[in-house]
Amino acid sequence: MKDRQREREEQTGSAQPQGKDETVGGSDVIGAREGIVFTAEQQEALAGLASSNTYAKQSKWKTFRELPMKDKWPFFAQHFLGVTVAIVAAVAAVTAFVVNYVNQPPDPLLYIAGVNMASEYTEPMEHLEQRFVSDQGLDPELVTYDANFTITETGVSGGMMDGSSRLLTMASVGQVNTIITDADTFQELSARGLVTPLDDVLPDARIDALEAAGITVEAESSEAQGGDNTIKGLDLSRSAAWTSQDGLPDDAVLGFSNVTETGVDYPRAFVEFLDFS
């Protein structure tokens, strides 16, 4: 019986002595029994991994403060850099917005839209604008002339959309409050509801005086305004200031648009400056 048992142990190799570490080259090697050999450096690394984490249960900020100097930047880059960059970018964006808003020039109180006015009239109009500002002692940033409005009956100009949408938008929000254009375009703008009756801007007594002098211009109102002919414009050929400025057209008409946002003080002052007679 013992001979058979010994024979089985020899066949399976189970008779090898246990509890002893093998040596390679005279040094201990952990795990040699399973065929794995670790160097001294690997053993040290394994020991570090097996040790408890000192920072496991504390905040990342506290961990960062307690880390050695050489480990601070890698830890910061991993845990804080992305958030810090995002915060700095957000603060910069808000600061830029605030600075731009604070330094933004005020909205004009007299915004004159030159509709279908040729570019050759821009310089004379700017001279007229400067004379008005100087004569009335006004802030030049509160008065502007914009001739970038071209409209057509079809809504197309030069193969592109005309300025109808831009003019409608700016008039609707009360940015454009004054219009200068030729007689035919004035009638078209009035029919579209872009010109307001003169009594929205001028006192009745002033309108009566202008009408008696033959200076007023009637125009058809839009359906939303009632559809009747209403006094809406002033003939600029009867303006002393207009006719004294070289280079301006003879058939221009002055009208007003949405004055609800800007008020009527600057439009009224402009009428008085033009000196109709």
Image (cartoon, rainbow, N blue to C red):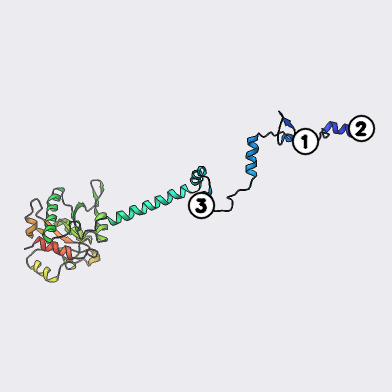
Residue topped by disc 2: 3
Image label count = 3
The Cα–Cα distance between marks 1 and 2, rounded to whole angstroms, is: 26 Å
- In the rendered structure, the answer to whether residue 115 lies left or right of residue 32 reads left
Residue topped by disc 3: 61
- In the rendered structure, the answer to whether residue 143 lies left or right of residue 36 reads left
Q: Are marks 2 and 3 in contact (CB under 8 Å)?
A: no
| Viewer-side residue, 119 vs 22 | 22
The 10 Å Cα crowd at callout 1, few under 14, some 14 to 19, many 20 or more, is few
Position above or below: 87 against 231:
above
Res. 107 image quadrant: bottom left
Looking at the image, tell me whether mark 1 or mark 3 is earlier in sequence order.
1
Q: Looking at the picture, which amino acid does disc 2 mark?
A: Asp
- Find residue 89 and report its horizontal and vertical position in percent: 40, 50
Q: Looking at the picture, which amino acid does disc 3 mark?
A: Trp
Circle nearer the viewer, 2 or 3: 3
Q: Can residue 216 be seen?
A: no
Position above or below: 18 against 126:
above
SS under mark 1: loop
